[in-house]
Image (cartoon, rainbow, N blue to C red):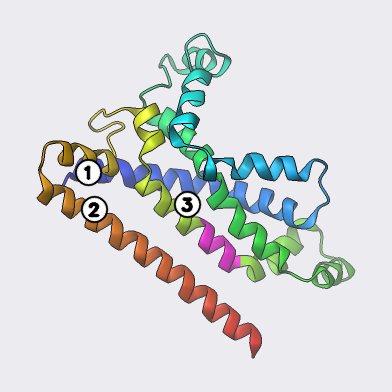
């Protein structure tokens, strides 16, 4: 087991989920509740990573963080470091790649809330933040949990964009998926099997938890 690669994977998955959670809440709610202009275009851009080859996403991100590009030069001016082949660059592209997993479950949960519930909250004198915290979030929490777990688990197993943007720097950008690839290349199937089994178990447990909590919430709502 490559424990250092596991540590990098867990850190990447945690920070990706952490930063995308509030984005998922507000963007998902806006898509579910508001009549946004150009909504099909916005949704298509958000869900594009689901169908776009990871190498294409990685390529365009590398172009965006090149030393002569706005993002790349701005980051270098602020930190004195390039973004390519660093954990920070890997985190940024991970945020983009996981947008669909952070937004879609939340959007579906907010869309399932009856508009009369929001109207009742306003009639009771609750402002936007009070209604969101006391009424909408408790009703939408299965979607929030699903979004967090799906984002976390998908990030753990991400390979294409990780290799394109992060490379294979030990202790910096070498994740568990890259370590599995290296072990297979070296014909070390035992180590590759152990790490693959770990990712398989984590993915299954996350999905099982999502299904269990969602079913419990649905059963509770039918009583």
List the residue tagged with mark 1: 180
> Please, what secondary structure does the residue beneath circle 2 have?
helix
**How much space separates mark 2 and mark 1, taking CA atoms?**
7 Å
**How much space separates mark 2 and mark 3, taking CA atoms?**
18 Å
Q: Identify whether 92 is placed above or below 195.
A: above
Camera-side residue of 115 and 187: 187
Q: Identify whether 143 is placed above or below 87.
A: below
> Please, what secondary structure does the residue beneath circle 3 have?
helix
Question: Magenta segment: does it hold 157?
Answer: no
Q: In this image, 205 relative to 71: left or right?
A: left
Main secondary structure along the magenta-highlighted residues:
helix
List the residue tagged with mark 2: 196
Query: Picture coordinates of residue 191 (x, y %)?
Result: 13, 48
List the residue tagged with mark 3: 151
Query: Picture coordinates of residue 132 (x, y %)?
Result: 72, 61
State the residue lying farthest toward the right: 123
| Classed neighbour count for the residue bearing mark 1: other residues with Cα under 10 Å, few (<14), some (14–19), many (≥20) | many
């Amino acid at each position: 087991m490559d424990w250092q690669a596991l540590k990098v994977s867990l850190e990447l998955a945690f920070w990706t989920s952490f930063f995308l959670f509030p984005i998922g809440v507000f963007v998902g709610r806006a898509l579910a509740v508001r009549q946004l202009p150009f909504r099909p275009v916005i949704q298509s851009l958000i869900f594009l990573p689901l169908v776009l080859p990871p190498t294409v996403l990685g390529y365009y991100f590398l172009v965006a963080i090149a030393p002569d590009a706005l993002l790349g030069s701005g980051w270098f001016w602020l930190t004195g470091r390039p973004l390519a082949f660093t954990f920070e660059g890997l985190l940024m592209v991970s945020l983009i790649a996981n947008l669909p997993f952070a937004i879609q479950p939340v959007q579906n949960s907010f869309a399932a809330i009856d508009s009369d519930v929001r109207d009742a909250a306003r009639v009771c004198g609750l402002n936007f933040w009070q209604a969101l915290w006391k009424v909408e979030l408790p009703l939408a929490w299965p979607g929030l949990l699903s979004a967090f777990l799906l984002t976390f688990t998908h990030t753990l197993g991400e390979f294409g964009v990780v290799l394109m943007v992060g490379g294979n720097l030990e202790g910096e950008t070498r994740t568990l998926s890259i370590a599995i690839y290296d072990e297979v290349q070296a014909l070390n199937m035992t180590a590759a099997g152990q790490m693959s089994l770990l990712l398989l178990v984590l993915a299954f447990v996350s999905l099982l938890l999502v299904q269990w909590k969602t079913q419990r919430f649905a059963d509770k709502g039918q009583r």
